[in-house]
């Protein structure tokens, strides 16, 4: 099994920056894609950004040019650098990872970290 643990959320003013981290723990053989999603109150969970094991990235249009996803494969960790944040970025941010463990190859999710942007 694998566990994902997010950190770095909090309260930030509009225009400010925040860096989220997500580390994967457990009996992990390999991790393919990793990503960040978010869910605001009353809304469905949506893609923020993804990154392949080779470093190819994909972003939602709403965060392009402001957020940067990166990863450290040696540490099984994915990051989300959030710059010039806006009130509409307020949400619970979840990371996920497509990981192969001793049990199976599946998508794992973290429990989420709250990001609140004040205007």
Image (cartoon, rainbow, N blue to C red):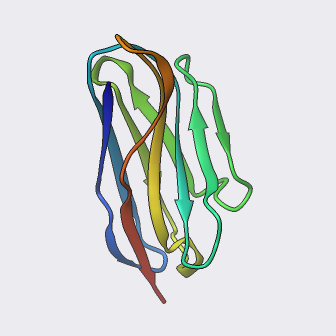
Identify which residue is drawn at 45% across, 52% down. 94
Q: In this view, does 26 lie above or below 64?
A: above
Q: Is residue 49 above or below residue 116?
A: above
Q: Which of 14 and 6 is in front in this view?
A: 6
- Residue 99: give x, y in percent of width and height: 45, 21
Residue 2 lies in what quarter of the image? top left
Identify which residue is drawn at 38% across, 14% down. 103
- Residue 61: give x, y in percent of width and height: 74, 56
| The N terminus, quarter of image | top left
**Farthest residue, direction front:** 103
| Count of number-bearing discs | 0
Q: Is residue 59 above or below residue 61?
A: above
Query: Is 20 on the left or on the right of 27, as rendered?
Result: right
Identify which residue is drawn at 54% across, 78% down. 41
Residue 79 lies in what quarter of the image? top left
Query: Is 80 on the left or on the right of 57, as rendered?
Result: left
Residue 39 lies in what quarter of the image? bottom right
**Farthest residue, direction right:** 61
Q: Nearer the viewer, residue 54 or 65?
A: 54
Identify which residue is drawn at 47% across, 80% down. 14
- Residue 119: give x, y in percent of width and height: 48, 89
- Residue 54: give x, y in percent of width and height: 55, 16
Q: In this view, does 89 lie above or below 100?
A: below
Q: Nearer the viewer, residue 55 or 48?
A: 48
């Amino acid at each position: 099994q694998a566990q994902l643990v997010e950190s770095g959320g909090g309260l930030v003013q509009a225009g400010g920056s925040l860096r989220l981290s997500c580390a994967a723990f457990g009996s992990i053989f390999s991790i393919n894609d990793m990503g960040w999603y978010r869910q605001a109150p009353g809304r469905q969970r949506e893609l923020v950004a993804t990154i392949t094991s080779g470093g190819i990235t994909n972003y939602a249009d709403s965060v392009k040019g402001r957020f940067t996803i990166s990863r450290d494969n040696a540490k099984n960790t994915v990051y989300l650098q959030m710059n010039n944040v806006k009130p509409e970025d307020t949400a619970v941010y979840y990371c996920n990872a497509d990981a192969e463990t001793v049990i199976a190859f599946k998508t794992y999710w973290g429990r989420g970290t709250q990001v609140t942007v004040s205007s």
